[in-house]
Amino acid sequence: MTYAITQTCCNDATCVAVCPVNCIHPTPDEPDFGRTEMLYIDPKSCIDCGACADACPVDAIFPADSLAVGQEPYAALNAAYYEQRGPRSAPEDGPTFHAWGAPSFARSLPSDFGPIRVAVVGTGPAGMYAAEDLLLHTTAEVTLVDRLPVAGGLVRYGVAPDHPATKRIGDAFARFHTHPRVRMYLGVDVGTDVTAEELAAHHDAVVYAVGAATDRRLGIPGEDRTASVSATAFVAWYNAHPEVAPDAIDLSGAERVVVVGTGNVALDVARILVSDPGTLAATDIADHALAALRASAVREVVLLARRGPEDVSCTAPELLALGRLPGVRVVVDDHDPRVWAAVEAAAAHEKAALLGGAVRERVDWSERPGTERRIVFRFHSAPEEILDGAVRVTGEGESAEIPAGLVLRAVGYRGLPVAGLPFDEATGTVPHENGRVEGRPGTYVVGWIKRGPSGGIGANRTCAAETVGTLLADAVDGVLPVPAGGARAFDRLARGRARTVVDARGLAAIERAERARGEESGRPRVKLGTLPDLVAAARGRRRLLR
Ligand code: F3S
């Protein structure tokens, strides 16, 4: 018997560290790491010890012979990774990994080195991996800063509510919220409440983990129409982000929604739009989104792809999951002979092959969506213009006008400039060298603002290790600027400037309040969706809570 890694793999490689026979790959010191969609267990080497399943932070690992319904393909998916790369014992045959990676040890400070104080701006995965690294391997004191009065970043506001296992990574990060060397300043905006210079002046180093806060534009006419919304805003809406109004999305008149893009975010929004609201009611989806989805007129979601199925940009696990959505038919618009040819030509382990189970249909866009709920892939089609109630698409040799009540743009995230730091407009990132910001001694970046908006949650672990390694090397080399103020001075500054500062106790109070609301309605939690409600809960006040 062997174990297999399944859909929710977060790629953070916690399992790699505990495997006694090194049969989980790619490991962080192998060239493929960060480039594969998930990690894979070699069925020929696994000795069935179960250590990886115990360690996995998102419960993605199970015995291959008892996978849940719908998860069965993962046994073959794990094995295929090794079959494609040849035998491990014969590296000269061309495998891209090796049996035993060179040992790598986290960088630490010399034992006689005094504690340094590091501010981490952003409490999403990148910031928390950086904080974890500092707390576990040094005596550093960490100041966690977030502009929102609640921690979590994209774990709280980006992961789809129907992926509760993925959200469990947040529990691993939460262990550090109450660490004795951590101080939390939630609700403090760097650039508004305190300047980047002030933050730097009170710490030995500052690590920015602010992510990619906006979406990429399509650059076509009609993009700013009311019915054209970024998928980032839609995701924030159904995740109860306090900066997106509950009525920001109107689904009451949209029978068809066009989603531009085929990445994981595009699939997330498509899934949520056609899922049975009764199923979503068991998740932590925003109350207002659940109500809107219950009253929704949406029966069809069209995913527009500029290229063909061989270039679909979502991961295989997400594509696989789409085919298992209860009551939802997956259709491939057969408007272009290249589409089905690519599906049929794909090897079994390739993503395009996963569309082979979809219905092949020449869609007549002049007809209204039928009564069944469905997701339609339309390949080789780029949006040309967003019209009033339709999207004009163009492809090689064929244009079409697809009637749609709502258009969601899901073509990627983009970083925003960080006050006081250099910024590369072309990539939407902060220029850096191994995490050290160019021309700013003592200032570092990690996550999407460092490397651009790609890679899942786990990719941030190695990204953070590089940044923290650079920071500690700079500390040892004595090149960190000497801070003018200490922890107390920063506390006075932050509390004097920000309207409300939520600390670890306040965060725990929010957690309790949301879980209590969830218990009342049989849900894991009901998120507080406004800044006043979050702040009231943090202060232990219940009067604002419904
Ligand atoms: Fe196999 Fe996981 Fe143990 S891969 S060897 S069951 S750590």
Image: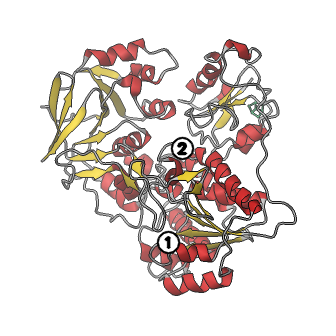
* Placement of 203 over or under 27, stated as above or below: below
Quarter of the image with the C terminus is bottom left
Q: From what the image shows, is residue 517 above or below residue 374? A: below
Q: Residue at x 70, y 36 (%)?
A: 29
Looking at the picture, tell me which residue is in the foreground, 288 or 316: 316
Q: Nearer the viewer, residue 346 or 362?
A: 346
Mark 1 vs mark 2: give the one in front. Answer: 1
Left or right of 539? Residue 129 is: right
Query: Residue placed at 81% from the left, 70% from the top?
Result: 114
Residue 151 vertical placement versus 266 (above, below) = below
Disc 1 designates what residue? 190
**Image quarter of residue 307:** top left
Mark positioned earlier in the residue sequence (1 or 2): 1
Q: Nearer the viewer, residue 448 or 70?
A: 448
Q: Residues within 10 Å of mark 1 (few under 14, many from 20)?
A: many
Left or right of 419? Residue 36 is: right
Q: Are marks 1 and 2 in contact (CB under 8 Å)?
A: no
Residue 145 position within the rendered picture, expressed as x and y whole percent measured from the top left: 57, 70
Instruction: Tell me how far mark 1 sits from mark 2, CA to CA.
Output: 25 Å
Q: Amino acid at mark 2?
A: Gly
Amino acid at the residue labelled 1: Val
As helix, strand or loop, the secondary structure at mark 2 comes to: loop
Q: Which residue is tagged 2?
A: 456
Q: Secondary structure at mark 1?
A: loop
Specify the quarter for ligand 1: top right
Residue 319, horizontal then vertical, whole percent: 45, 31
Residue sitting at x 75%, y 60% = 477
